[in-house]
Amino acid sequence: MKLSDEDVELFYKLHPALRFYTNQRKGILRDVTTIEEFMDLPIEEKKINFHLRGR
């Protein structure tokens, strides 16, 4: 699938917020309460544990 330039820009704009939301909803990063705190984390801590998806 090839996205338009506008869609690529939108994806990169929304992606961090979606990752933050998912981590919060799954209770993975309980101590992180803002997207700013989330963005300041090392990349290893931002990863969603996919084995927790069914939680």
Image: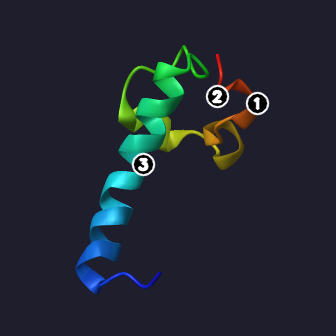
Q: CA distance from mark 2 to mark 1?
A: 6 Å
The residue nearer to you, when weighing 44 against 10, is: 10
Tell whether 5 sits left or right of 24: left
In front: label 3 or label 1: 1
Query: Which residue does the image show at 47% across and 81% down from the upper left?
Result: 1
Q: Are marks 3 and 1 in contact (CB under 8 Å)?
A: no
Q: Are marks 2 and 1 in contact (CB under 8 Å)?
A: yes
Tell whether 55 sits left or right of 4: right
Percent across and percent down for residue 7 are 28, 74
Q: CA distance from mark 3 to mark 1?
A: 20 Å
Residue type, mark 1 in image = His
Q: Secondary structure at mark 3?
A: helix
Mark before the other along the chain sequence, 3 or 2: 3
Which residue extends farthest left? Answer: 6
Image: 13 above or below 46? below
Where does label 2 land, which residue? 53
Where does label 3 land, which residue? 16
In which quadrant of the rendered image does the C terminus lie? top right
- Disc number at residue 13? none
In front: label 3 or label 2: 2
Query: Which residue does the image show at 58% across and 22% down from the upper left?
Result: 29
Residue type, mark 2 in image = Arg
Q: Secondary structure at mark 2?
A: loop
Q: Secondary structure at mark 1?
A: helix
Percent across and percent down for residue 31 are 53, 15
The residue nearer to you, when weighing 26 against 44, is: 26
Image: 33 above or below 45? above
Neighbours of disc 1 within 10 Å: few (<14), some (14-19), many (20+): few
The residue nearer to you, when weighing 1 against 36, is: 1
Where does label 1 land, which residue? 51
